[in-house]
Image: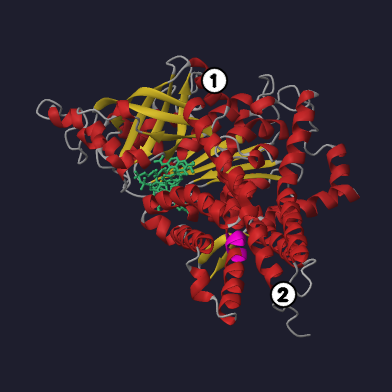
Amino acid sequence: MGWPYHFLTLSQQDVLLRRQTIDRYALIAHLAALAPALLLTLLRLAVRAAGLIPRNGHNGGDGGRGRYSHVPGSPTVKAQRSSGLGLLAARWRALKWWLGDDVVVRGVQWGQRDEWLLGLVWTGVLLVLCVLETGQDYLHLTKRFGSIAISQLPIQYLLSLKALNPYAYAFASSHEHVNRYHRVLGRVIFALIIAHIVFYNVFFVLSGLWLKRFFAPVVFCGVLAAVALHALMGTALVRVRTLSYRIFFITHLGVALLTPVLLFFHAHSARFYVVESLVVFLVDIAVRKFGMITHTASTVEIVPGTNLIKITAPMPAHKIEDFRSRPGSHVYLSLPPEGRTSNHPVSKSFIFDLLFNPFTVAAASQDNQTITLVARRRTGPMTNMLSQVASSSSSSSSSTTSFPPQSPYPGDHATNTITLAIEGPHGAIGKQFQHLLAWGPSRTLLVAGGVGATFALPLYHALRRDLASSSPAHVHFVWAIRSAADATWAMAPNSSSDDNEKSLLDDDNVHLYLTENLMGNDASSIELQDMRGSSRNNKNSRRPNFQKIVDDLFRHGADEKVAILVCGPDEMARDVRRRVGPWVFKGREVWWHNESFGW
Ligand SMILES: Cc1cc2nc3c(=O)[nH]c(=O)nc-3n(C[C@H](O)[C@H](O)[C@H](O)COP(=O)(O)OP(=O)(O)OC[C@H]3O[C@@H](n4cnc5c(N)ncnc54)[C@H](O)[C@@H]3O)c2cc1C
Ligand SMILES: NC(=O)c1ccc[n+]([C@@H]2O[C@H](COP(=O)([O-])OP(=O)(O)OC[C@H]3O[C@@H](n4cnc5c(N)ncnc54)[C@H](OP(=O)(O)O)[C@@H]3O)[C@@H](O)[C@H]2O)c1
């Protein structure tokens, strides 16, 4: 079968008919992508109205207590497991697990299987919509590719929203999780646009019109939009993002605002979609700016003997309640104009107009009306500014401050205050916490590496407090740290809640692993001596053996449900997941969550 398309000369009426057909298919593609979010949102609202699911993850405060769940190992559970439905459910769980695995090609990670599957299926659907009813008309096909691509633009914007993301709401997920599909759809749209560009160029060249049409305003707007999209795709590459998050961020923002304007003039028929895209984008920014951000005079201090910065931010009572009901959630930190005072010259840089960095809420205290963040100083402007602010008061008083005397880090025990803008709570786990309680794991394992404990620790406390179906003794927390000082921020009594939790050092369910630097940098500090004392018992000086930890967790009973939550370096999360997989394939029920640093 040869190439079916030809350059046709159409009558006015046929041109009009072609335009109507293109618009109809673009609308179908648009509505098909919106439909899942719309339908599920309506369903959730209906169920909520009927009072069947909790609002914002709240369930009336009982945390799932009082719900009936079968006792693991009981005859009922055994019968359910071996029934046809039970076996089918086990297969479904294994399939879901398999779909959640990473796709790794020559050591490079290329997203997860479900992203590829969805991406391929959706590309197939859109390609069909690009081709149907195009007949032999080459220009119809060419224009159709462009229109179908632009019909997906509002969906692409909706998928990226932080406050009003309908997909996050519909799927009880969060913007950073949904962002995985934003990346997938971005690539699909880009591929369709490339096809549109190639087809048009072939047409212009073969018709001898290339130079004349290229600079025609309507075409040139499209050319500029294409250049902008190439810049966006180029700077979104993981390598560029890692090299400079700023370049990625500024390009993304600039192109997101500019492209709809260019496309507005490039294609009349696309106007509805580009206006829709811009409107949802701007409304989301407005909602975040005026509804979700708290400006708060925060205390910033360096955790002695580490490059960790502890930020204590006062918050209104209702916000504290929000954070407490969503343990493990994160906020975006930025520097508002009030924070940029001459007290802290470093804060005056224009770069802070472009920064909003995510940090996990390590503690939310109703008594003190504060939340606590713990940030590792990295190489970028935000963590370095925080570090300098924390250090500044100590450098001015360094002649008098001498504790701890041997610390190699400037600013130890220093405190300072700066106004910060805090936006949140955000994050999938905060939304899913109540569902986890209701799911009722028999055993729960929390794993953290380094500063990943900002995520795991509040969840550990909340789960021990709220989990009805398993005894608190069945919630374990494994924490690997490089030096003992890295854990001191978490050791203070009540460091992460108002509840009377015992110190982590006295808690047999907390397993600290010192992987390096057992003697620490500030061997004189009291905290470290405490840690060393306890490391004689259950603390290990090497990395945790996840094979053994995971196997021990599952060996208690085939009917037990197990929840595993990880927050640490990618390698650690991969390691734990690799050990859990075989148990899922054996039919075990697992609630898995990997909180990762990037998206
Ligand atoms: C959900 C989440 C929770 C986090 N919690 C903590 C925590 O509790 N403690 C801690 O020390 N670190 C945490 N991080 C990492 C922390 O955000 C970065 O280490 C920090 O932003 C680095 O700031 P910087 O000024 O040194 O460098 P920057 O150059 O500003 O950023 C470096 C890297 O941080 C990430 N980053 C920055 N801004 C954003 C953004 N708006 N959205 C997504 N990623 C961004 C990117 O990976 C970027 O490459 C968390 C990250 C995420 C995604
Ligand atoms: N919400 C979030 O998304 C969030 C929040 C906070 C932190 N984080 C994550 O937490 C990580 C921690 O950063 P950090 O700088 O504080 O870490 P760090 O100081 O490097 O500590 C990581 C610890 O984990 C251990 N570890 C690493 N891989 C392991 C493995 N496969 N098995 C067992 N132990 C392993 C390390 O041991 P070695 O010394 O042997 O390497 C080290 O003790 C970040 O990379 C980030 O991904 C995420």
Residue 113, visible in the rendered structure: no
Up/down of 594 relative to 193, above or below:
above
Earlier in the chain: of badge 1 and badge 2, it is 2
Asked where in the image residue 431 lies, by quadrant, the reply is top right
Q: CA distance from mark 1 to mark 2?
A: 67 Å
Q: Amino acid at mark 2?
A: Thr
- Where residue 471 appears, x then y in whole percent? 65, 29
Q: Secondary structure at mark 2?
A: loop
The numbered mark at residue 9 is 2
* Residue 190 among those drawn in magenta: yes
Q: Nearer the viewer, residue 278 or 70?
A: 278
Distance from mark 2 CB to nearest ligand 1 atom below 8 Å:
no
Q: Magenta: predominant secondary structure element?
A: helix
- Where residue 468 appears, x then y in whole percent? 69, 26
Up/down of 199 relative to 408, above or below:
below
Q: Secondary structure at mark 1?
A: helix
* Residue 23 among those drawn in magenta: no
Residue 532, visible in the rendered structure: yes
Residue at 69%, 63% in the rendered image: 144
Up/down of 79 relative to 372, above or below:
below
> Residue tagged by mark 1?
321
The numbered mark at residue 309 is none
For residue 381, side relative to residue 151 (left or right)? left
Q: Nearer the viewer, residue 130 or 36?
A: 130
Q: Which residues are magenta?
A: 187-192
Residue at 84%, 52% in the rendered image: 88
Asked where in the image residue 240 lies, by quadrant, the reply is bottom left
